[in-house]
Amino acid sequence: MIGHFGLVLGLALLIALALRGVNILLAVLLSVLVIGVTNGMAFQEIFLEYFPFGASGAFTFAGNFLLLFLCGALFGRIMAASQAAQGVAMGITRRLGAKRALLIAMLVCALLTYGGVVVFVVIFTMYPIGVTLMREANIPRRLYAAAIALGAGTFTMTALPGTPSIHNVIAARSLGTDLFAGGWFGVFAGALMAIFGMWYLERQWRLATERGEGYQATPKDEQMAAMAAATGKKLPSMGKSVLPIVLVLGMIAFPRFLLLAGVEAEWIRFTLAQPVLWASFALLSGAVLCYLLFPPVRKNFVRTAGQGADDALLPLINTAAVIGFGGVVIQTAGFHAFAGWLLELPLPPLVSVFLSANLISGITASASGGLQIFMSSLAPAYLEAGVSPEILHRVANLAAGGLDSLPHSGAVIALFTLMGLTHKEAYRDIFVVTVLVPLLAALVVVAAAMLLT
């Protein structure tokens, strides 16, 4: 009984510390200690076995996905340094106009993240541009932040097929599928998220305008506006800026298209069987194209590449720490009882997948962390129950992107910190577009998959 209490206490401690802004690695280690001690684990088991090197260990995950994080961060940093990311953003802005600022924010973030640019780089790219958009269109800051979250942290993260996102790669690597698994279901879910999310944001903008609520500047906004103005006249064209993203996505899709066309080759099978390596190579190729196309990045390439490598470390360590937390949790009797309860519920398998992946991601406040734990601990049971790997890939991805954005989510906290917002001011809108809307889309896909498969 004390072990079950300790498991709940450890989870509550992790959430409380994260909400207070405590470093996630420190929060995880303290929470792991509470869970391990109350469940009778020895210190060496906690910190030298289960947390670092278990099937869901922090170092196990970091070793498997270091290359993908590194290449993704390099690509994102070089896209920013070359001003290509800004070129994409300003190109869409000029075509749609500032009055469609929420749609612009969503589209730019979606395009950049779908092409492999790291979410944190996207946030920092959109903030300087967003100051101008918010000011011209008189948009409340909370709604602009929600539009960024919708574009960067929902359908391109878990739904759309082919993306080199860590979530898509985790599922492919665990199930032996490729990055396009369950593609049509993903496209359908992505469309639902984008449409309903934008409907909600536009409606809230209209209501805010009627109440007299609008944009309020901060001292940091003035600095960001000056930065955007200083670089705005020197940005590359949108057509040129989008080429590295097209290359990344094209390289990922090309082997799949060849296979569908009946072309058989060993290297094609290799690319589909090694999603981490091939996605990493595609991202690296995109970075090389940036180097060739854009002179600004060549001036300080070594420093920029070093900054990209640094950018990879914090997300990798934080994600690995959350997964290591799960690696300890899954060793407890309470988790095994919880998993057994989930598997024994009188529910169709896909509904059970939806429920279990959501709950685990909610506990860890991480879609990637929850998905990794789900794949290592529960996915084999669903495969044995007859769920196809391709459907399991997409449904589990969609489900993991539901409760991952609860208030203690690291990405939510980072976005609010950057934009000078509090949970009280802005979390309601974030909750709707990154939790409620993805949950709805995932449930619709579950229903469709049950009818069609």
Image: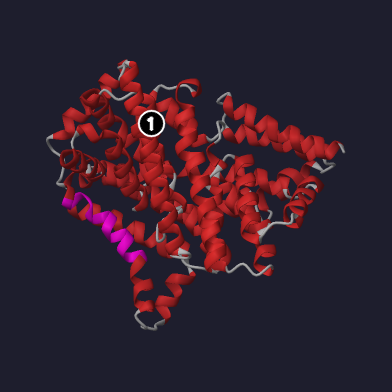
Instruction: Look at the picture and state if 187 lies above or below 272.
Output: above
Q: Amino acid at mark 1?
A: Ala
SS for dot 1: helix
- Residue at 22 percent of width and 32 percent of height: 99
The verdict on residue 407 being magenta is no
Query: Is residue 371 found left or right of 42 in the rendered image?
Result: left
Residue 21 locus on image (x, y percent)? 55, 25
User: Is any part of residue 115 visible from this angle?
Assistant: yes
- Residue at 40 percent of width and 33 percent of height: 146
Query: In which quarter of the view is residue 318 placed?
Result: top right
Residue 339 locus on image (x, y percent)? 74, 52
Query: In which quarter of the view is residue 143 placed?
Result: top left
- Residue at 29 percent of width and 39 percent of height: 103
Q: Which residues are magenta?
A: 239-252
Query: Is residue 358 found left or right of 114 in the rendered image?
Result: right
- Residue at the disc numbered 1: 145
Query: Is residue 9 found left or right of 266 in the rendered image?
Result: right
Query: Is residue 199 found left or right of 379 in the rendered image?
Result: left
Residue 443 locus on image (x, y percent)? 54, 51
- Residue at 40 percent of width and 21 percent of height: 420
Query: In which quarter of the view is residue 218 placed?
Result: top left
Between 44 and 86, the one nearer to me in the picture: 86
User: Is any part of residue 302 visible from this angle?
Assistant: no
Q: Within 10 Å of the Cα at label 1, are there few (<14), some (14-19), or many (20+) other Cα atoms? A: many
Pick the quarter of the image with the N terminus: top right
